[in-house]
Amino acid sequence: MYTERYVDGTLIGIECIQGDSTIAYIPILQDNVDYQRYKAWLADGNMPQVMHSSTTIPSDEPTPEERLAALELVVSMVLTEDDADV
C-alpha cells in the first residue's frame, strides 16, 4: 500500500508499507527504482492513500492583532477612569 505525503499542498514523498509491515520512504526522483515501480502501479489504475499535513503549528497564544486590541482596550479603560476622577 502506498501513501502520498503532502505538506501545505506540496507532495514531499511516498511511503510504502512492505510485506513485513515496515514502512519504506520513496523519494520523488525519476531515476529511483522504487519511484518507477510506484508510477507503474499508478499507471495500472491503482490509487494511493493521501496524507495531508501543515507546517502551521496550532497555538493558544493570542495573535499580534488580538494582543493589540486587548492593549487598546486596557488603555481606553485607564483613560476613562482618569476622566472620571477629574
Image: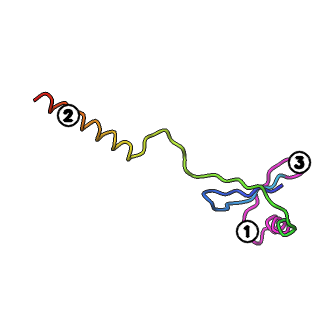
Name the residue carrying label 3: 20
User: Residue type at mark 3?
Assistant: Asp
In terms of image quadrants, where is residue 75?
top left
Q: In the image, residue 7 lies at what x, y percent?
A: 63, 56
Q: Which mark is residue 84?
A: none
Q: Is residue 13 above or below residue 40?
A: above
Q: Residue at x 73, y 62 (%)?
A: 27
Q: Residue at x 77, y 55 (%)?
A: 49
Q: Which mark is residue 80?
A: 2
Name the residue carrying label 1: 29
Farthest residue to the front: give it: 84
Say whether residue 24 is magenta: yes
Q: Give the magenta part as a residue range.
A: 18-40
Farthest residue to the bottom: give it: 31
Q: Residue at x 34, y 43 (%)?
A: 69
User: Residue type at mark 2?
Assistant: Thr
Q: In the image, residue 30 lies at what x, y percent?
A: 75, 72
Disc 2 to disc 1: CB gap under 8 Å: no
Farthest residue to the right: give it: 19
User: Residue type at mark 1?
Assistant: Leu
Q: CA distance from mark 2 to mark 3?
A: 71 Å
Label 2: which secondary element: helix
Q: In the image, residue 20 lies at what x, y percent?
A: 88, 48
